[in-house]
Amino acid sequence: MPTEILRADDERLADYVALTDVALRRRTEPERGLYIAESEKVIRRALAAGHRPRSLLMARRWLTDLADVVEQAEADGVPVFVGEHDVIEQLTGFHLHRGALAAMQRPELPSAAALLEGARRVLVLEDVVDHTNVGAVFRSAAALGVDAVLVTPRCADPLYRRSIRVSMGTVFQVPWTRIEPWPGAIADLQEQGFTVATLALADDAVPLDELAADPPDRLALVLGTEGDGLSHHTLAAADLTVTIPMAGGVDSLNVAAAGAVAAWALRPAQPGGS
């Protein structure tokens, strides 16, 4: 039977404390080897990806909607906690309108070399620090057939709660790992046969539609951080720079939108296609 929680300071719920404190969670979640999945859909996608729950926390009504998940968790010896909304809000710091949370065991990331074997289209996120943008990039990557996502050491955590939620759980679907050192690892991508293209404004940039007319077989597209964009070292080490032609006096798009446009335009031709 699920365990009812009556107090927000219950020590068994340490994984869920202060979920809105970004700085705290960014430090403690990797240290504890966990991440938080929020909402029924995200929890189910995490479980379908083979990730292991540490515990479940939910409002009572979700015991019905997640009955099969709860049953399996209890069979596996995973604690299931239920509580009133006000107690959960005191504990986590926000109103749990999506009903359910799961503290999940953080999976071990693969090596970049293993991840890239057989990949043709890769997105690289250089120091993208906004969790919403990271999640949106993963959602686009899943929808547009990107084979893998690489994130640099200073990039926001794809397994942070907001990133996962914005991605609609597709962060569990698209293979990803951290790549380092950066930008030194650009040479590793090139050695594996990737053309490395940066998405940026530059005088010598190739228009996206021109590159899309004859795209390379293996392409790693590098997207830069909000505001500052890509580093000069990255631009210098890449094979080419690509730009999206703009109208209406606009010089750039949000990083997630730009990545989606480029990923769609540069998607590889299907076997047998014209």
Image (cartoon, rainbow, N blue to C red):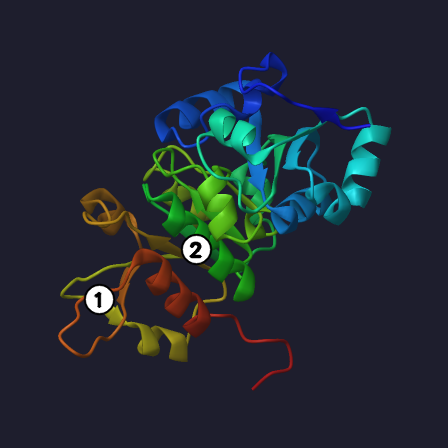
Residue positioned 56% across, 35% down in the render: 85
Under tag 2, what secondary structure? helix
**Which residue was labeled with disc 2?**
137
Quarter of the image where one finds residue 162: top left
Farthest-out residue, top: 11
Pick the residue in front: 60 or 181.
Answer: 60
- Tell me if residue 13 comes above or below residue 250 in the rendering: above
**Which residue was labeled with disc 1?**
205
Expressed as whole percent of the image width and height from the top left, the position of residue 5 reads 65, 22
- Tell me if residue 150 comes above or below residue 255 in the rendering: above
Answer whether residue 239 is visible to the viewer in this image: no
Is 223 placed left or right of 108 in the picture? left
Pick the residue in front: 90 or 233.
Answer: 90
Residue positioned 33% across, 44% down in the render: 130
Quarter of the image where one finds residue 66: top right
The amino acid on which the numbered mark 1 sits, given as a three-letter code, is Ala
Q: Residues within 10 Å of mark 1 (few under 14, many from 20)?
A: some
The amino acid on which the numbered mark 2 sits, given as a three-letter code, is Val
Is 71 placed left or right of 243 in the picture? right
Under tag 1, what secondary structure? loop
Q: In the picture, which quadrant includes the N terminus?
A: top right
Expressed as whole percent of the image width and height from the top left, the position of residue 180 reads 41, 34
Farthest-out residue, right: 75
Is 246 placed left or right of 195 in the picture? left
